[in-house]
Image (spheres, rainbow, N blue to C red):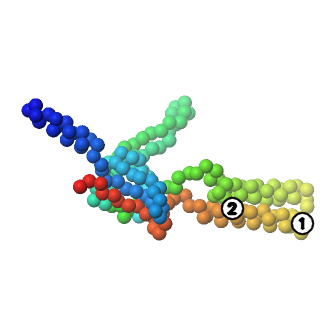
Amino acid sequence: MRKLLPVIFIFSFVSAFSQTDFLVLKKRDRTIQTFMPGSLITFQLDNHQWLQGIIKKIAKDSIFIREVKINPVYGQWGFAGYDTGILDILRFHIKDLVAFPAKEKSFSFISNGMLFQLGSASYITLNIINGLARKENIFDKKNSVRLGIAALVFGIGEYLHLSHPADIRLGKKYRLLYIRATG
């Protein structure tokens, strides 16, 4: 029995630190994110349903997830809190996953066009309200140029907004790889 004790210790140590299968989200050749058992994942299925959960196991091109629902709630005194619901373990093939949420970048309100849209819409609204209050012709030659430039800036903001999607779609540019680490 004493001779068997070091062998049991070594096997328990090796099994505690053994590698598991994992998923890698890549943009062309660059790794965006790695998903392992125990990590939180949010994704969209091919039926357009978004799910969030904790990865329990990744094996044979399948992912086992314990679904988690996090909802904001308000107590009797009006203080905000969160209610967490933990559901059953669900199994999905990795081909069922079609999208992941894009990470928020700093100053994304500038690059996604929201600032352009907000500024130009505010200018157009204020210009029209002031023109009506002063009983001026809103669409005279001088003011039409100003409104046209503001509309153009709004259009640029809309183009930027449409070209910056809120999610990462798997396809040509992004792909999800299953990495088998166990023998």
Q: Position of residue 124 (x, y in %)?
A: 79, 59
Would residue 86 appear left or right of 3 to someone viewing this image?
Answer: right
Q: Position of residue 92 (x, y in %)?
A: 33, 58
Give the camera-side residue of 178 and 128: 178
Q: Quadrant of the N terminus?
A: top left
Q: Can the viewer see residue 81 in this picture?
A: yes
The residue at which mark 1 appears reads as 142
Q: Type of residue at label 1? A: Lys
| Residue under the image location 33 percent in, 55 percent down | 63
Would residue 97 appear left or right of 89 to someone viewing this image?
Answer: right
Q: Earlier in the sequence, mark 1 or mark 2?
A: 1
Q: Type of residue at label 2? A: Gly
Secondary structure beneath dot 2 equals helix
Give the camera-side residue of 61 and 180: 180
Q: Is residue 175 above or below residue 12?
A: below
The residue at which mark 2 appears reads as 157
Report which quarter residue 59 is drawn in.
bottom left
